[in-house]
Image: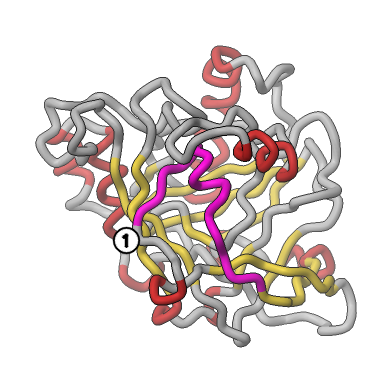
Amino acid sequence: MMHERKIAQWLNSLVKQDPGAGSEPTKLFYYLEVADGGIIQTYPGTAFEKRRKHVPHDVRINDMRSVRDDFTLDKSGFELINHKTAVQDFSNDEEVKAKYYPEVRDIIKKYSGASEVHIVSHMCRKSTFAEAQDDAKIKGDKEFVTKNNPARFVHVDQSYRGSEQILFLNLPEEEAEQKIKKRWAIMNVWQPFEKAVKKDPLAFCDFRSVDEKDFRTVVANLPPPGAGEYGNVSKNLKHNARAEYSSNGDNAAVYEVTNMAYNPNQKWYYASDMTPEEAWVFKIFDSKNDGRR
């Protein structure tokens, strides 16, 4: 979602915490360097992506429930909000577009002060990691995996350059050129449905604990429009000369994402037992230099 007014920092949080209370040991999966067999290009939604290797590291993730009031868009770049959706069936794309999209516009405007919101796409993750891995085992690298599981590696959906690529993929060139002259941003809304989150909760890294030297750029080659779980991100805006597509002529979008290398100074947070009446609002990019992440 893109908007033009003040928002805060992605990958950011406060340091206020009790290191011993509400802290969970776990493993996070980080970028595997190219010298060690890592990649600089990937194909989201394919068996190749599901089989991709990462570097596991032991970390502690802090439950932010005890300091919830301190985590806001203006202070931390992510905020846990109360929101009861009118959507009954998130597997019904038309219902999501008709009901949830207007809700998301209102959420973004309320919590960021945005004057305008443009919805890019949505995705429902309904499968487990094991189910997705089993599906990938029987498919070739470029085949699409039908099981859509939560991402299990440290990443930001778009890099700085990738955010501009997304802007031009989703708006006509003249309109995008006008937006880019003003303050604009990319934000996400993440909400569970049906039941509380007991596995694979979304986690955020304290931006002040992040060194940008740990950022790693990877080029994401998306499926053509309508193909695979990421097919709704590819838009056929051929009249936009700045929209970037794959060279094989299938109208598939190409943009940069950010992965991260491990750093022991990074601090992580999550919200325990998140319910369907709650949602995360968080930021991917901000064109203003002092609040970009």
Residue 237 lies within the magenta run: no
Expressed as whole percent of the image width and height from the top left, the position of residue 155 reads: 51, 60
Q: Is residue 133 above or below residue 8?
A: above
Q: Nearer the viewer, residue 8 or 47?
A: 47
Q: Is residue 219 left or right of residue 275?
A: left
Q: Nearer the viewer, residue 34 or 278?
A: 34
Expressed as whole percent of the image width and height from the top left, the position of residue 270 reads: 73, 62
Q: Is residue 19 left or right of residue 102?
A: right
Q: Nearer the viewer, residue 242 or 101?
A: 242
Task: Tell me where the magenta segment starts and ends, as one range.
Answer: 41-56
Q: Is residue 244 above or below residue 31?
A: above
Q: Is residue 200 above or below residue 242?
A: below
Q: In the rendered image, which quarter is residue 262 located in?
A: bottom right
Q: In the rendered image, which quarter is residue 142 located in?
A: top left
Quadrant of the rendering where the C terminus is positioned: bottom left
Q: Nearer the viewer, residue 5 or 13?
A: 13
Expressed as whole percent of the image width and height from the top left, the position of residue 198 reads: 86, 48
Residue at mark 1 = 160
Model colouring:
secondary structure
Which residue is rendered at x = 36% and y = 73% of the image? Answer: 290
Q: Residues within 10 Å of mark 1 (few under 14, many from 20)?
A: some
Which residue is rendered at x = 46% and y = 74% of the image? Answer: 36
Residue 119 visible here: no
Q: From this viewpoint, which residue is outermost toward the right? A: 21
Quadrant of the rendering where the N terminus is positioned: top left
Residue 16 visible here: yes
Q: Is residue 200 left or right of residue 159?
A: right
Residue type at the position of mark 1:
Tyr
Which residue is rendered at x = 45% and y = 55% of the image? Answer: 284
Q: In the rendered image, which quarter is residue 62 located in?
A: bottom right
